Amino acid sequence: MVLRMDHSEHQVGTHDHDATAVATESIWRTAISATLHCLTGCAIGEVLGMVLATWWGWADAPSIALAVVLAFFFGYLLTFISVRRHGLTVRNAVRIAFAADTISIAVMEIVDNAFLLALPGAMDAGVADFFFWWALAAALAIAFVVTVPINRWMIGRGKGHAVVHSMH
């Protein structure tokens, strides 16, 4: 008995597999890009908030509150500026920023602040202390790693940063 392989079916199957792999890789790249964008806004807000709160001698709760508010502000601001450059009205730019960034920033803030609270001495370190900067960088790095798959999931469903990236 001789088995013959139909190469045309094999080619289609391979092509479909390759297209799916490229699309999946593209979604992951977009998710990483979106998360880096959110990380930038969060980092600006977190660093500024923690530096100011530490300098002013604030307790943990108000320090974290200030850092979170500033992280959301700068995260939204970066998206707002980006979409305004593409001609959106102020109202639509605000809507897009909220839709694109809210979940991503919220996850980052929960993760990085939980890490800072759980790490002994992190909230007591001074701005001139290396441990302060190391803890903040580690918290943001961990938040990035946790947030990428969440952004990937949202982008795959046309939500979050998929809206912003469709404008580019």
Image: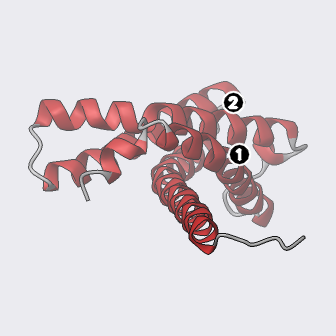
Q: Earlier in the sequence, mark 1 or mark 2?
A: 2
Q: The residue tagged with tag 2: helix, strand or loop?
A: loop
Color theme of the render: secondary structure
Q: Residue furthest front?
A: 1
Residue placed at 8% from the left, 49% from the top? 87
Tag 2: residue type? Ala
Tag 1: residue type? Val
Question: Which residue is nearer to you in this view: 132 or 94?
Answer: 94
Residue placed at 70% from the left, 53% from the top? 145
- Residue 100 position, x and y percent, is 39, 38
Question: Which residue is nearer to you in this view: 21 or 127?
Answer: 21
Q: Is residue 96 left or right of residue 121?
A: left
Q: Quadrant of the N terminus?
A: bottom right
Above-or-below relation of 157 to 25: above
Question: Which residue is nearer to you in this view: 46 or 42?
Answer: 42
Name the residue carrying label 1. 146
Q: CA distance from mark 1 to mark 2?
A: 27 Å
Marker disc for residue 59: 2
Q: Quadrant of residue 53?
A: top right
Residue placed at 51% from the left, 47% from the top? 42
For marks 1 and 2, give the one nearer the viewer: 1
Q: Is residue 17 left or right of residue 26?
A: right
Q: The residue tagged with tag 1: helix, strand or loop?
A: helix
Above-or-below relation of 74 to 94: below
Residue placed at 48% from the left, 49% from the top? 38
